[in-house]
Amino acid sequence: MKIVITGSLGHIGKPLTANLVEKGHQVTVISSKAERIPAIEALGGKAAIGTFFDLEFLTSAFTGADIVYLMEAWEGIGSIFDKDVDFVSAFEKIGNNYKTAVERSGVKKVVHLSSIGAHTDTGTGSLYLHNKVEGILSQLPEDVYIKFMRPVGFYSNLYRSLDSIRKNHAIVSTYGGDQKEPWVAAEDIAEAVAEEMEKPFAGRTVRYLASDEVSHNEVARILGKAIGVPELQWQVISKEQMLDGMLNAGMNEWIAHGFIAMQAAQGSGSLYEDMYRNRPQLGKTKFSDFAREFAKIYHQK
Ligand SMILES: NC(=O)c1ccc[n+]([C@@H]2O[C@H](COP(=O)([O-])OP(=O)(O)OC[C@H]3O[C@@H](n4cnc5c(N)ncnc54)[C@H](OP(=O)(O)O)[C@@H]3O)[C@@H](O)[C@H]2O)c1
């Protein structure tokens, strides 16, 4: 099939491109940077250079595709430390561009990378953005079939704690303990997306994605062992302390408040209610596999 993927060679785009090429599909990879062309071609893909803010570019890139994979990349919108960025209107803009480009290009099958929390517009903090985009894409005509993929938090989010792990032997959050929490590997998302592309499409469907269920104390214990820091702690601080820290560091206010609200929904479990009503089979990449990869990066510097 002719498949167009957004998300370049990012966390999901790279393994997804490799997977689809391996299966014999013709894959066009959208990237915002021309210097990415050699890496895309080395994987067996064809590069289309442009941005998801450019409707004409998207329409032309999508034309002739059997399936498009759509995602919104935060880094293409702006820094979470830029107080002037309006993330809600940027996500709306990208969602509307995708919708119009799909209609104009005549593509009938869409796989959308959404997120856990997209089932509701309330109480999920910054994940509201994904509910918004799902809503926009859902307005496409009925003969456009859409598979909404809703992954839980990525293992790779833990790389954001590298500094604090190195300096303080701690991962800091507003909740923790022994309550199991789902996590997902980007490779497992890519595999599920590729698998969905080869299965029949019908109407609008939702698939939740998780790879393992591990409590925060287990995360600290397993990562600590993998990196040779057995005293590594999952440290819980108050919401107020966390919010003050983020705002003092210059974080965009909407993002900072959205992060606190998202963690509250994770801690209470409300974020996962719909997923547990539609419980997914866990992917194959376990937390211990990720811990080995994390240890390599940890020891690099
Ligand atoms: N982290 C989590 O726990 C989590 C959980 C659920 C859902 N999600 C969602 O997953 C998505 C992130 O997926 P990912 O990790 O695969 O993405 P990613 O690796 O962060 O980024 C994908 C790529 O998009 C490209 N890009 C940036 N700006 C662009 C633009 N203006 N136009 C076109 N392409 C652009 C960049 O590549 P180039 O430099 O080549 O352009 C970037 O590497 C987000 O929507 C996020 O909210 C994340």
Image (cartoon, rainbow, N blue to C red):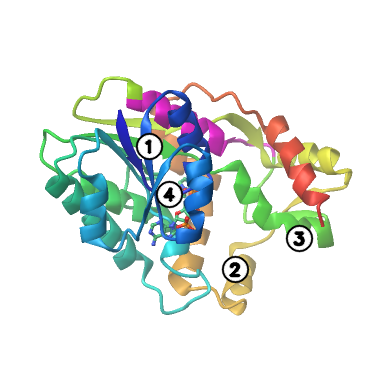
Q: How crowded is mark 3: few (under 14 residues within 10 Å), some or many (20 or more)?
A: few
Tell me, yes or no, whether the highlighted magenta stretch contains residue 186.
yes
Residue sitting nearer the eye, 249 or 299: 299
Is the residue marked 4 within 8 Å of ligand 1, measured from its CB?
yes
Is the residue marked 1 within 8 Å of ligand 1, measured from its CB?
no
Of tags 3 and 2, the one toward the viewer is: 3
Is the residue marked 2 within 8 Å of ligand 1, measured from its CB?
no
The C terminus sits in image quarter: bottom right
Q: Mark 3 points at which residue?
A: 164
Q: How crowded is mark 4: few (under 14 residues within 10 Å), some or many (20 or more)?
A: many
Give the SS element for disc 1: strand
- Going from N to C along the chain, the mark reached first, 4 or 3, is 4
Q: Name the residue under label 1.
A: 27
Residue drawn 36% across and 54% down?
128
Q: Mark 4 points at which residue?
A: 7
Give the SS element for disc 2: helix
Part of the protein shown in magenta: 178-197
Disc 4 + disc 3, Cβ < 8 Å: no
The N terminus sits in image quarter: top left
Instruction: For residue 203, say whether it is visible.
Output: yes
Between the residue at mark 1 and the residue at mark 3, the CA separation in whole angstroms equals: 39 Å
Q: How crowded is mark 2: few (under 14 residues within 10 Å), some or many (20 or more)?
A: few
Residue type beneath disc 3: Ser
Between the residue at mark 4 and the residue at mark 2, the CA separation in whole angstroms equals: 34 Å
Q: Which circle marks residue 136 in the picture?
A: none
Of tags 1 and 4, the one toward the viewer is: 1
Residue drawn 22% across and 56% down?
96
Q: Find residue 168 and report its horizontal and vertical position in percent.
A: 82, 60
